[in-house]
Amino acid sequence: MIGFIKKDLAMIKSNFKLLGVLIIVYAIMGLMEKMDISFILPFMCVMIMISSFSYDNYNKWDAYSISLPNGRKNSVKSKYITTILMTLIVSIITIILSFIISYVNTKTINYEQILVTMFGTIFGTLLVLTIMYPIIYKFGVEKARIGIFLLVFGIVIVGSLIANFLDLSIVLKSLAFLEDYLIIILIIITIMMVCISYKISEKIFSKKEF
Amino acid sequence: MENILEIKNLCKKYDNFELKNISFTLPKGMIMGFIGENGAGKTTTIKAILDIIKSYSGEIKIFGLDNRKNDKEIKEDIGVVLDDMFFPEILTPNDINNTMQGIYKNWDTKMFNDYLKEFSLLPNKQIKTFSKGMRKKLEIATCLSHHPKLLILDEPTSGLDPVARAEIIQIFQSILEKDDCSILFSSHITADLEHIADYITFINNGEIVLSKTTNELLDKYGIVKCTEKEFKDIDKKDYIKYKKSKYEYEVLIPDKKEFKTKYNISVIDKITLDDLMVLMIKGEA
């Protein structure tokens, strides 16, 4: 199991230089109060993880991994653990930078805002990845790109249709009592999302043939 | 003799191809050459052995255990070189070493590093910078460094130049001298197998055509070269396949000695695995 995680981390490390550059750009933009690009690091996290599937796919690692002890299970499990690790690392970097930028610019620290940013980052990153992974395991990384595009497109269409028929302000008002529990709710939803996505991916991969 | 690998009635159906009742056994400490033309079913059989394909019928036992029920236990003792399947090429031999330490209980870092030195592979270079021969050597180093009891090699010499092929065959020969390891060696380059394989299993169009010891095949089988008149005198029971060329008939016979006692045909050539494959595939019954 540890070996599979080490392999995924070794693949990701080649992106660390680019990640470093982006952190510097993010810090400079924030400190100069030019633009808030806090989305850039989670976005990079998503891209790095997806590219790790592309490398796996190119050299048929998935098929090879099955020839290793417990390969079918550990190959999927390691991808999820590496994803969680990467998301946490990126979120911690984001939070530290937000902390510094907020303090330098305003001489005050808005803890609540920073916490929401951090959990929002984790939630957003994992939301995209947990939706993508079962699709990647089922259809392969190339087809999954199209699938994800269609999925996002579908969500936007359905969302806008719902928004047309429903008065969202009423919905939001009725959910206002949840505001105090926002972070806990986000954590619970995130954990559930990861667990469900993992179980689906594991099932798909356990039956997959190469 | 204890069998390391036993396959019984393995069947797998695709839209345009089918494995039909594949059965053979590999005794302990032996090398089996698994031959057949491209697309004959060698890789599919190997994928079934390793559980890379799932929906097949039949029984596969490795070390006496069911390959699907005892996956982890079995794979700890198997080393594989698969055709075009390996670690992502942005990784380095050092990354492979770190990974495998966490995968195999018996992973031997010293052995792996010794192989890297022996094969002149730089540990910090990305796999993508290696030539095809170097990649194969890295795959071989990886498959050997956890002291496997069974090696499954799918076309390990395919696409290599003659020098690299000879080098790789020599590596396997030296491993056999050192370790008590069994090998299933699939190849369509049969010359690689003639000198090292104890058994030959020949697959054609998804079916096992023959599975015999190499000595039996090369000593007993032969090719009779004769005229049309001579060929017409040969009983159908005494040959397997024949091929008609412009001036003569090439006839594959299963027993040279017996043939000599029955017929007065003097030109009986020794057979090579290449001849055998060509006659079995292209010859007429």
Image: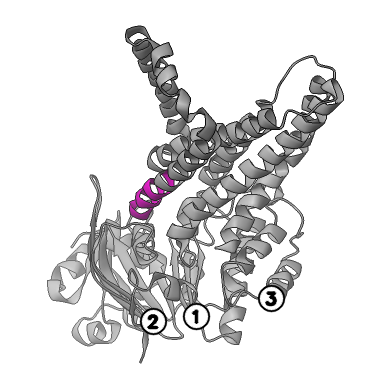
Badge 1 and badge 3 both on one subunit: yes
- For the C terminus of chain B, the image quarter is bottom left
The residue segment tinted magenta is A197-208
Q: Chain of mark 2?
A: B
Query: Mark number for residue B63?
Result: 2
Above or below A88: residue B162: below
Q: Chain of mark 3?
A: B
Q: Is disc 2 surrounded by few (<14), some (14 to 19) or many (20+) residues within 10 Å?
A: some
Q: Is disc 3 surrounded by few (<14), some (14 to 19) or many (20+) residues within 10 Å?
A: some
Could you tell me what secondary structure mostly forms the magenta stretch? helix
Q: Chain of mark 1?
A: B
The one nearer the camera, B20 or B276, is B20
- Residue B31 in percent (x, y) is at 45, 78
Residue ID at (34%, 62%): B48
The one nearer the camera, A170 or B113, is A170
Question: Mark 1 or mark 3, which has the lower sequence index?
Answer: 3
Q: Is disc 1 surrounded by few (<14), some (14 to 19) or many (20+) residues within 10 Å?
A: many
Reading the image, the residue beneath label 1 is B149
Q: What residue occupies the far bottom of the structure in this picture? A: B1
Residue ID at (79%, 26%): A102
- For the N terminus of chain B, the image quarter is bottom left
Circle 2: residue type: Phe
Q: What residue occupies the far top of the structure in this picture? A: A164
Q: Secondary structure at mark 1?
A: loop
Res. B237 in view: yes
Above or below A71: residue A86: above
The answer to the question of whether label 1 and label 2 lie on touching residues, with beta carbons closer than 8 A, is: yes
Circle 1: residue type: Lys
Reading the image, the residue beneath label 3 is B111
